[in-house]
Image (tube, rainbow, N blue to C red):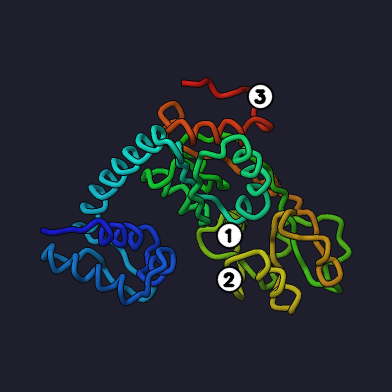
Amino acid sequence: MRIDIESLRVFMAVVEEGSIATASRALHLVASAASKRISDLEKDAGSALFYRHSRGVLPTPAGDALYSHAKQIFEQFRQIDTLLSEYSGGIRGHVRLSVTYTAMVHYLPDDLRRFTSEHPEVRIELVEKTSDVVVRMVENGVVDFGICAVPDPSLRLTCLPYRVDRLFLVVPVGHLYASRKSIGFNETLDHDYVGMQEGASIHTLCTRAAEAANRRLKLRIQVTNFEAVRNMVAAGLGIGILPEVGIPEHERSRLVSIPLDEPWSSRPLNIVCRDLENMPAPARMMVEQLTQSNAPRRLPRR
């Protein structure tokens, strides 16, 4: 079987995204080109690598086996790249991280500015994903570390504190709840919601809280970013839940934000990694700097 690296990269992206179209966008490919690479792989393998269904694709047993080996191959490439980059005369480091929208837009710009001013030789590869995809990319060794609201407390990953978000109910001006000083989540469940996409930590928190109350979240529409939530809520399509950093001051003319009176409304964002002690040196330096203001200790140097 003949496999080229680019086809393997496309294959891994399709497994991780669960969709050829989504993987194509992430890799800046046209969907037909990605689809052909997958078809050629399946032809060479003599076996289907994916089950196709209406919402995307899932790997077959053969696909799972190939993905497991592909992860090892790309991990070895990553280690080689890191090793060589640290010895090169120009770029002496390369950090790969996957983060949520909140971290990407509201927290990391200033933090990365400080880091790059101190370490101009380090190159950063940064991608934005939902929390569950961030975790999966860390588990699979696709990135050095991630930043997300950890969706599952039983995860076997190292978690370090980064930031804490406070969640608010967002309603249009003049809404029934607009004058409230705080509100319980269960009180809101009779209303239509504008929700985040599946996999986003806010979506996971809200659906779990509704299930705990033996209720169902009435999702009228789902979107992929905070701006879209604000616009849909302002248009009267439903109410929403957003972190405080996702509700800028200039929105007060059309939206009202109400603190959620729930234990889970304080949402920690964590740095997650597989093996802190064996992390490449540039990534370790970045983790140390990102946690300095939040953790009481400094990470020991290797």
Label of residue 296 in the image: 3
Q: Is residue 158 depicted above or below 11 in this figure?
A: above
Q: Position of residue 262 (x, y in %)?
A: 71, 49
Q: Amino acid at mark 1?
A: His
Mark 3 packing: few (<14 Cα in 10 Å), some, or many (20+)? Answer: few
Label of residue 222 in the image: 2
Q: Position of residue 226 (x, y in %)?
A: 66, 64
Instruction: Tell me which label, 3 or 2, sits earlier in the chain.
Output: 2
Could you tell me if residue 286 is visible in this image?
yes
Label of residue 203 in the image: 1
Q: Judge depth for marks 3 and 2 and give the one in front.
A: 3
- Relative to the observer, which residue lies in front, 73 or 239? 73
Label of residue 223 in the image: none
- Relative to the observer, which residue lies in front, 221 or 261? 221
Q: Position of residue 281 (x, y in %)?
A: 46, 30
Tell me which residue sits at (18%, 69%) in the image: 40
Mark 2 packing: few (<14 Cα in 10 Å), some, or many (20+)? Answer: some
The residues bearing labels 3 and 2 have C-alpha atoms spaced at a distance of 39 Å
Could you tell me if residue 212 is visible in this image?
no
Tell me which residue sits at (80%, 72%) in the image: 172
Q: Is residue 188 depicted above or below 184 in this figure?
A: below
Q: Secondary structure at mark 1?
A: helix
- Relative to the observer, which residue lies in front, 138 or 218? 138
Q: Residue 296: which quarter of the image?
A: top right
Q: Are marks 2 and 1 in contact (CB under 8 Å)?
A: yes
Q: Amino acid at mark 2?
A: Gln
Q: Residue 298: which quarter of the image?
A: top right
Q: Amino acid at mark 3?
A: Pro
Tell me which residue sits at (68%, 67%) in the image: 227
Q: Is residue 254 depicted above or below 75 in this figure?
A: below
